[in-house]
């Protein structure tokens, strides 16, 4: 068999095809993830530093930022289903017991934050309807650069903290809805 001018024995050809298929599948998966998620620039941290995102608490108080690697993001995204097991806590900005059914269905912004000497990733998420509105109305806000912070909206907007050292999520917060 010939691959770009190379002639390989059958055994090497099978191995080369398997490796090529794995690379193509991995590249496709990464491309699909990047269409709905982004690591925000560290400069975006100022919007989150207030720890109040209109109708939900923001990330925990952080002392600095860092840039998560591709492998950090790949690990985080492979653990996304864990988020659906979390419940919000009762508090002044939230009603306890709420959860997110399908976290992978949301657009996600990632910000590396330092809390108590640990590198964590804050996930800021918003629904497809919001993403389409940003595109449809040609908003001057690029969700890949600027944090998307909605007021009210219920489960259209949520945030969670991810710990790359443990592979676990915590502190799920969902926006309040207009009715409370």
Image: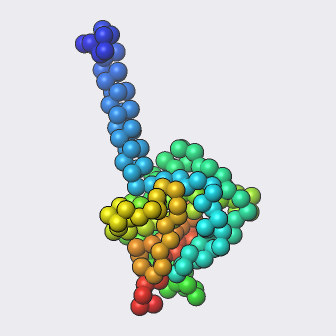
Direction from residue 85 to residue 58 in the image, left or right? right
Name the residue nearer the viewer: 178 or 132: 132
> Which residue occupies 38% across, 32% down?
23
Residue 150 point in image, percent of width and height:
47, 74
Residue 162 point in image, percent of width and height:
57, 60
Residue that extends furthest to the bottom in the rendered view of this protein: 179
Name the residue nearer the viewer: 142 or 67: 142
The figure's colour scheme reads: rainbow
Q: Quadrant of the N terminus?
A: top left
Name the residue nearer the viewer: 85 or 35: 35
| Residue 8 in view of the camera | no
> Which residue occupies 63% across, 62% down?
45
Residue 164, above or below 63: above
All told, the count of numbered labels is 0
Residue 130 appears in which quarter of the rendering? bottom left
Residue 29 point in image, percent of width and height:
37, 44
> Which residue occupies 50% across, 71% down?
149
> Which residue occupies 54% across, 44% down?
71
Residue 4, above or below 104: above
Residue that extends furthest to the left in the rendered view of this protein: 1
Residue 56, above or below 60: below
Q: Quadrant of the C terminus?
A: bottom left
Residue 118 point in image, percent of width and height:
70, 57
| Residue 107 in view of the camera | yes
């Amino acid at each position: 068999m010939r691959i770009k001018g190379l002639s390989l024995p059958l055994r090497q050809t099978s191995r080369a095809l398997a490796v090529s298929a794995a690379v193509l599948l991995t590249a496709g998966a990464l491309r699909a993830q990047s269409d709905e998620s982004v690591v925000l620039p560290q400069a975006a941290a100022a919007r989150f530093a207030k720890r109040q995102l209109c109708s939900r608490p923001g990330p925990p108080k952080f002392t600095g930022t860092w840039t998560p690697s591709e492998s950090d993001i790949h690990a985080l995204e492979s653990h996304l289903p864990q988020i659906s097991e979390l419940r919000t806590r009762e508090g002044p900005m939230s009603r306890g017991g709420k959860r997110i059914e399908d976290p992978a269905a949301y657009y996600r912004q990632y910000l590396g934050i330092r809390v108590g000497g640990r590198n964590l990733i804050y996930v800021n998420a918003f629904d497809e309807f919001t993403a389409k509105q940003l595109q449809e109305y040609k908003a001057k806000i690029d969700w890949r650069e600027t944090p998307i912070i909605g007021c009210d909206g219920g489960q259209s907007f949520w945030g969670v903290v991810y710990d790359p050292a443990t592979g676990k999520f915590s502190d799920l917060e969902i926006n309040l809805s207009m009715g409370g």
